[in-house]
Amino acid sequence: MPRPVIIVPYDSEWPRIYEKEKKLILDAVGGIIKSIEHIGSTSVSGLWAKPIIDVIAGVDGHGDAEGCRELLQHIGYDDASPGDTPDWFYCLGKGPHSPGFHFHLVKEGSQFHRKHMLFRDWLRAHPADADAYRDLKIELSEKYRNDRVAYTESKTAFIDGIVEKAKKSRT
């Protein structure tokens, strides 16, 4: 049975947990990774989230992603699935303890990579939009408690709208 969608209040320990995991990841993969960032709701101060730390790392290509995937297995990332775009190589899971981790290996500088950074940075700088996202997530987590796919898909329009606002503000 799939795990239910549970949204919890922001935990001020999430950034520290990310930094500790980042060090562990970088020690494991060395210089293969070009960039590594804390993304997702746990990276936005005050935002409610599923207790899963999302990490995104940019690499040069699929070969580097495959090398990282193999090395990350040694530090507990054992649930690997291919991403669903050409620039998203893998999503690796580590858990199931709380918080868990999702590690996204992507093409450095790709549209997929930039989209996640724009979304995070916008929410960090615009608390009203972060609050609206929190409210949406709480509502959807109640509606789709046992359907993670529907929960995720139902957030897409909001996320895409924020990314478009962020893009326009840079032009």
Image: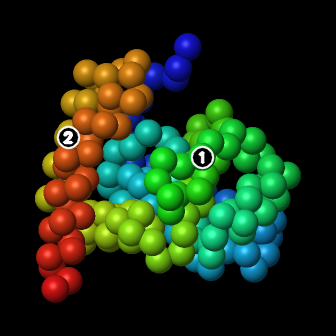
- Residue 140 location in percent, x, y? 26, 30
Q: Nearer the viewer, residue 90 or 15?
A: 90
Eye-nearest disc, 2 or 1: 1
> Total label count?
2
User: Is the image coloured rainbow, by chain, by secondary structure, or in one colour?
Assistant: rainbow
Q: Nearer the viewer, residue 108 or 31?
A: 108
Give left or right: position of 10 versus 33: left
- Residue 67 location in percent, x, y? 78, 63
Q: Nearer the viewer, residue 51 or 94?
A: 94
Vertical order, 132 against 128 (above or below)? above
Identify residue for label 1.
82
Mark 1 belongs to which amino acid?
Pro
How many residues crowd around disc 1 within 10 Å: few (fewer than 14), some, or many (20 or more)?
Answer: few
Residue in the image at 45% along x and 22% along y: 4
- As drawn, the residue found furthest toward the bottom would be 171
- Residue 74 location in percent, x, y? 85, 52
Indicate the quadrant where residue 43 lies.
bottom left
Residue in the image at 74% along x and 59% along y: 66
Mark 2 belongs to which amino acid?
Asp
- As drawn, the residue found furthest toward the right would be 74
- Mark closest to the chain's N terminus, 2 or 1: 1
Element on which disc 2 rests: helix
Residue 135's disc is: 2
Q: Is residue 164 visible?
A: yes
Distance, label 2 to label 1, CA atoms, is: 30 Å
Residue 142's disc is: none
Residue in the image at 21% along x and 71% along y: 166
Give left or right: position of 23 versus 87: right
- Residue 87 location in percent, x, y? 50, 62
